[in-house]
Every structure is written in structure tokens, then in C-alpha cells.
């Protein structure tokens, strides 16, 4: 709970000042904001005028002038109509402003997190990020689109109502002010506690969302290992902790509401008792007492509303802090302030110059230790070695998902850190070890490689990847919806779609990370032929455990414990002995035994 305590202390220190972070999102809509404020001030003023009209009507019953009495009623009706129109206009403007600002915050937050390097996602669960984008922004919507408006309106009514109370009856108003300190103290004391509980509640909601996201995205593994009961228990535990924090928050807010309303209306009853005696003594008219009562109720209602809204603002401040944390997250991988332009079409020369790298999550283990590697344009280089040797790390550094701790990585002689990531990544096509399939049609999944590609180009890429046959057999062919993460497809089919996506991209640098690992022998042969055709004239890096797929590579680079231990062709490395020869002997011997 040490982390919770730290977050609570941070929440206390910032108080409501965190809401100031919303101002940059409000500034583009100043006209809408000031229009909403104008409608808000107008409705507050009309509300304050209404009791005066009521007093005129009440006192008008004592007059014999029927026309004057009619004018009082018409004036009261006109004020009520103006109040109705103004309130409707205020609701429209404020709600529209809230929706617009929250939409901008959601987009800004997503724009920020979509570009963050994998280092960020080593520290936070994706489900928690989604909770902040959805749950926290929804809370901000209720505050910007409602609570802030109501709070400002009640502040105006409170200030104006107090002034008009003194104008109506200074004596009774002085008695009312005696109650004010008694009301303010519980608002301040309980309000601080409320904000801490609100932040804790939001943190547990985010934790439960992260747990649910992780479990549901791996639901088949959960079910295969009969882990449903444990998963239900873990989610229930997070949910119950969230509920417990919410229960304590609700209890605190309810107690604050009870105390404030009891104190306010007890004071009003006492003041009315004094006022009734003044009416009997002809010290004030019935209309003045009614006017004073209405203003008292308005002031009391404003204070009660502000005490409730205070809790909402506390929650909004907590939500704003969490969103600002995402928006202001510093990334270890950033684009240069003055980037060098990437060529229109890269040659594909790749160079690793004495590269050293440790993953942030494993700083004690060197993923790459002094790696120097030059790949000529159009060359096919295979990266082999045991798991964890550093092969996939080469791919991740070349895509600049991470920056090396030392050394440099260059494309066509230019350090990747001197170019924008989007600029040089357009020259690279990737087929990852675990192919990513989106919840869309098969056609759109392939077109992800090049969004402007025609249907004919998509189908040509699918043929080259040996995917056209099974795609044509789907119920709607290429337009068949393949489900979330491609649940309707086999592992080999997903991988062929990923290969077709890379083929369609038509980039000068091709990265294949275990691209054929999930294919059967027949499909592997067909895809290998497609890869051979695709790699001609392109710089190709192939990460592979199955050495049979890389025998034809121009060069094979053997990795062990983050270092290059051997380089050469398949025949040279087998003849040389060492790690590669041992791996080849194990794999090919096992293959012959299996046959």
C-alpha cells in the first residue's frame, strides 16, 4: 500500500489545481465558453430577480388597483419565461462545450500513447491506459458539461442572494451569517478526505480494467488451463476493492451532505421564526418575508449544491491528474528537433556499430553486447541462435522501438536517431513472430501494409504469400470479417496474411521474425518461394530457429548471449563446427528421425 499512500499524498498536495490542466483544451473554444458563461450569468441574475417579482405579487394582493396586480403577474410570468429560455440555452452551450473538450482530450491522450515506445508499456497495463481514456474522460465530461456550470451558477446565486438578503432585511441576514462558519468547516475537512477516496476509487477501477483486459485477450489460454475460477477471483478482488473505496467515498459524501443541509435548514427555521414575529409586529411586510424566505432557500440550496459539487470536482481533479500523467509522460525514444530527411527510396544499407543494449525491464542482462554488423543493399542475412540470444532485439532496435545504450544504428549511412521514426519506418516492412490481425476483413488486414492499395494489388500480394486460396474459400472471400485478433483463422493463415501485408508494403528493407514458424510443410514451401522472390533486390533480415528456412541466405549470423559468435554461409558454418553446427545437427537429425 506504499504506492497508494504516495498517490494519496500527491492528491492532497495538488488539490483542485489539477483542473487547470484543462484550460489549454478550453482555449480553442473561447467563443463557446464565453457564450455559455454569458447564459449562465443571465440565468443567475434572472433567478435573483424572480423573488422580487414574487414579493410584488404577494404584496399586490393588498392593493385595490387590479391593473397593477395584473402587471405584477405578467412581469413574474415574463421573468419565468426568460429563465426557462436562458436555462435551456445554458444547458445546450455547456453540454456541447463539455462534449467537444472531452473528445479533444480523448484524441490527445490516444495520440500520445499510440506513439510511445514499448518501454512505456513495460510499466503500465494496456487496460489501465484504456480506463483512463474512457472512465476518466467520462468523469470529466460530467464535470465540464454539468458540474462546473452548476457550481458557477450557484456561486453567483450565493453571492447575489446574500447581497439581496441584506437588502431585504439586514437583521435577519445577520442571523443567517452566523450559520455560515458551521457549514464551511465540514465542507473543507470532509472534502479533503473525499478527494483521496475518489483517487483511490479511480485507481482500483483502472486496475480491474487492466486485469480484465489481460485475461480476456488470453481467454483461450485461461480456459485451456482451467484457470477460470482463479481469474474470476482475481477480478472479483479488484472489483471489491474498488467498491470498498467507492463505499467509503459515498459514505463521506453522504455525511457531508447531511451535516450541511441540517445546519443550513436549522438556521433557516430559526430565522423564519424571528421573521414571523417581525411581520406580526408590522416591522416588515408579508411579501418581504416571502422574498427573504425565497432568497434564504436559494442561498441554502446553493451552499448544499456546492458541497455536493465539491465532491465531483474532487473526483474530476483526480481523473485530470491521471490523464495529465499520460499526456506528460516522457518517452525514452523521441524524434529529433531538427531531423535529417530520409531518402525517397532507401537503398537498404544497414549498419550496427558496436551496439550495446539492455531492456529497461532487465537492466542487469545485456540483450546485445558490442554487436557490429553491416548488411549490404539487397543482401539476405539470417540471424540464428538460441532463444534470448538477441536476434529479435536486432529487429526491435532497427525499427527504433528502443535506442541502444551505446553505439549507433544506421540506414544508408544516417543514424536512425537523426531521422523521424515515421520517415525511416516507411522503408521497412515487418512480419512479426506473432502476427497481429485486426478486427476487420481479410482485405483490410492486408491493406494495412499500404492503405492506398487497390483490390487487385491486395489480391496479388495474397497470391504471393500463398494466401489467395484459403481467402477465396472464406464465406465472403476477401471481405470476410476475421474476428478480434483473427480468431476465425488458423495460426498459419494469420501468418500468411501478415506476409501478404509486408509484400504489399513494397519496402526496400524486409524484416522477417520467424515468418514461417506457424506454417505446415506445404504452406512453408509456398511461402518460402514467395519470400525468395520478394527478397530479390531488397535488404532482408530473417530471424529463424528452423535452420532449413535460411540455408539459402547470402549470409548467416550466429548469436549467443547478445554477441555475434560466427558469420558465414550454411555450408561454411557447418564445416566450421561450433554453435551453428550443433544446432544444425540437432535439427536435421531430428527431422530425419521424424520422417
Image (cartoon, helix red, strand yellow):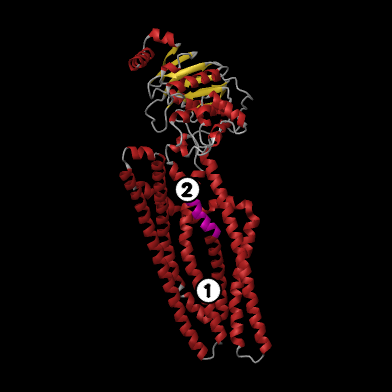
Answer left or right for 25 relative to 202: right
How many angstroms separate mark 2 from mark 1 (CA)? 37 Å
Q: What stretch is highlighted in magenta?
A: 135-145
Question: Residue 309 location in percent, x, y?
Answer: 48, 63
Q: In this view, does 77 lie above or below 531?
A: below
Question: Residue 347 location in percent, x, y?
Answer: 60, 19
Along the viewing direction, whichever of 105 and 224 lies nearer the viewer: 224
Nearer to us of marks 2 and 1 is: 2
Q: Is residue 357 above or below residue 91?
A: above
Which residue appears at 44% of the width and 81% of the height? 270
**Is tag 2's residue or tag 1's residue first in the polypeptide sequence?**
2
Residue 132 image label: 2
Along the viewing direction, whichever of 172 and 427 lies nearer the viewer: 427
Which residue appears at 67% of the width and 83% of the height? 71
Please tell me how crowded label 2 is: few (under 14), some (14-19), or many (20+) other residues with Cα within 10 Å: many
Question: Residue 142 location in percent, x, y?
Answer: 51, 58
* Residue 17 visible from this viewpoint: no
User: Toward which corner of the image does residue 360 lie, by quadrant?
Assistant: top left
Which residue appears at 47% of the width and 62% of the height? 310
Amino acid at each position: 500500500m506504499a504506492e497508494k499512500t504516495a498517490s494519496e499524498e500527491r492528491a492532497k498536495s495538488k488539490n483542485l489545481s489539477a483542473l487547470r490542466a484543462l484550460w489549454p483544451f478550453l482555449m480553442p473554444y473561447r467563443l463557446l465558453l464565453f457564450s455559455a458563461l454569458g447564459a449562465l450569468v443571465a440565468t443567475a441574475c434572472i433567478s435573483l430577480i424572480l423573488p422580487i417579482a414574487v414579493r410584488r405579487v404577494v404584496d399586490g394582493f393588498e392593493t385595490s388597483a387590479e391593473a397593477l396586480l395584473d402587471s405584477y403577474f405578467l412581469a413574474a410570468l415574463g421573468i419565468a419565461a426568460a429563465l426557462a429560455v436562458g436555462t435551456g440555452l445554458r444547458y445546450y452551450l455547456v453540454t456541447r462545450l463539455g462534449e467537444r473538450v472531452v473528445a479533444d482530450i480523448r484524441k490527445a491522450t490516444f495520440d500520445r500513447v499510440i506513439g510511445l515506445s514499448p518501454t512505456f508499456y513495460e510499466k503500465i497495463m494496456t487496460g489501465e491506459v484504456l480506463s483512463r481514456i474512457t472512465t476518466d474522460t467520462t468523469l470529466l465530461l460530467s464535470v465540464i458539461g454539468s458540474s462546473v456550470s452548476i457550481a458557477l451558477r450557484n456561486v453567483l446565486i450565493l453571492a447575489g442572494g446574500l447581497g439581496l438578503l441584506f437588502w431585504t432585511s439586514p437583521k435577519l441576514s445577520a442571523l443567517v451569517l452566523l450559520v455560515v462558519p458551521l457549514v464551511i468547516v465540514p465542507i473543507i475537512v470532509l472534502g479533503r478526505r473525499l478527494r483521496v477516496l475518489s483517487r483511490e476509487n479511480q485507481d482500483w477501477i483502472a486496475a480491474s480494467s487492466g486485469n480484465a483486459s489481460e485475461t480476456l485477450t488470453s481467454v483461450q489460454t485461461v480456459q485451456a488451463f482451467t484457470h477460470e475460477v482463479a481469474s474470476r477471483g482475481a477480478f472479483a478482488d479488484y472489483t471489491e476493492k474498488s467498491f470498498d473505496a467507492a463505499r467509503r467515498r459515498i459514505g463521506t459524501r453522504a455525511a457531508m451532505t447531511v451535516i450541511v443541509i441540517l445546519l443550513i435548514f436549522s438556521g433557516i427555521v430559526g430565522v423564519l421564526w424571528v421573521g414571523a414575529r417581525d411581520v406580526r409586529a408590522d416591522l416588515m411586510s408579508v411579501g418581504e418575508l416571502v422574498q427573504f424566505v425565497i432568497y434564504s432557500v436559494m442561498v441554502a440550496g446553493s451552499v448544499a449544491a456546492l458541497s455536493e459539487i465539491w465532491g465531483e470536482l474532487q473526483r474530476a481533479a483526480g481523473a485530470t491528474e491521471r490523464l495529465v500523467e499520460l499526456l506528460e509522460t516522457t518517452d525514452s525514444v523521441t524524434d529529433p528537433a531538427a531531423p535529417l530527411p530520409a531518402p525517397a527510396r532507401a537503398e537498404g544499407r544497414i549498419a550496427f556499430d558496436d551496439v550495446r543494449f539492455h531492456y529497461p525491464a532487465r537492466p542487469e542482462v545485456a540483450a546485445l553486447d558490442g554487436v557490429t554488423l553491416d548488411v549490404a543493399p539487397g543482401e539476405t542475412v539470417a540471424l540464428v541462435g538460441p532463444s534470448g540470444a538477441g536476434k529479435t532485439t536486432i529487429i526491435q532496435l532497427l525499427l527504433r522501438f528502443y535506442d541502444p545504450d551505446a553505439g549507433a544504428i544506421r540506414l544508408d549511412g544516417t543514424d536512425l536517431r537523426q531521422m523521424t521514426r515515421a520517415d525511416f519506418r516507411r522503408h521497412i516492412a515487418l512480419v512479426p513472430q506473432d502476427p497481429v490481425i485486426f478486427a476487420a476483413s481479410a482485405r483490410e488486414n492486408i491493406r494495412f501494409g499500404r492503405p492506398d492499395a487497390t483490390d487487385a494489388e491486395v489480391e496479388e500480394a495474397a497470391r504471393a504469400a500463398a494466401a489467395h486460396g484459403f481467402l477465396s474459400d472464406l464465406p465472403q472471400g476477401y471481405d470476410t470479417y476475421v474476428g478480434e485478433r483473427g480468431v476465425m483463422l488458423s495460426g498459419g493463415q494469420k501468418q500468411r496474411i501478415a506476409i501478404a501485408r509486408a509484400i504489399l508494403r513494397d519496402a526496400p528493407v524486409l524484416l522477417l521474425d520467424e515468418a514461417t514458424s506457424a506454417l505446415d510443410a506445404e504452406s512453408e514451401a509456398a511461402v518460402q518461394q514467395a519470400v525468395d522472390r520478394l527478397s530479390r533486390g531488397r535488404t532482408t533480415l530473417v530471424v529463424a530457429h528452423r535452420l532449413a528456412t535460411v540455408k539459402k541466405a547470402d549470409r548467416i549470423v550466429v548469436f549467443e548471449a547478445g554477441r555475434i559468435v560466427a558469420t558465414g554461409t550454411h555450408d561454411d558454418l557447418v564445416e566450421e563446427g561450433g554453435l551453428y553446427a550443433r544446432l544444425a545437427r540437432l535439427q536435421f537429425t531430428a527431422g530425419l528421425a521424424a520422417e
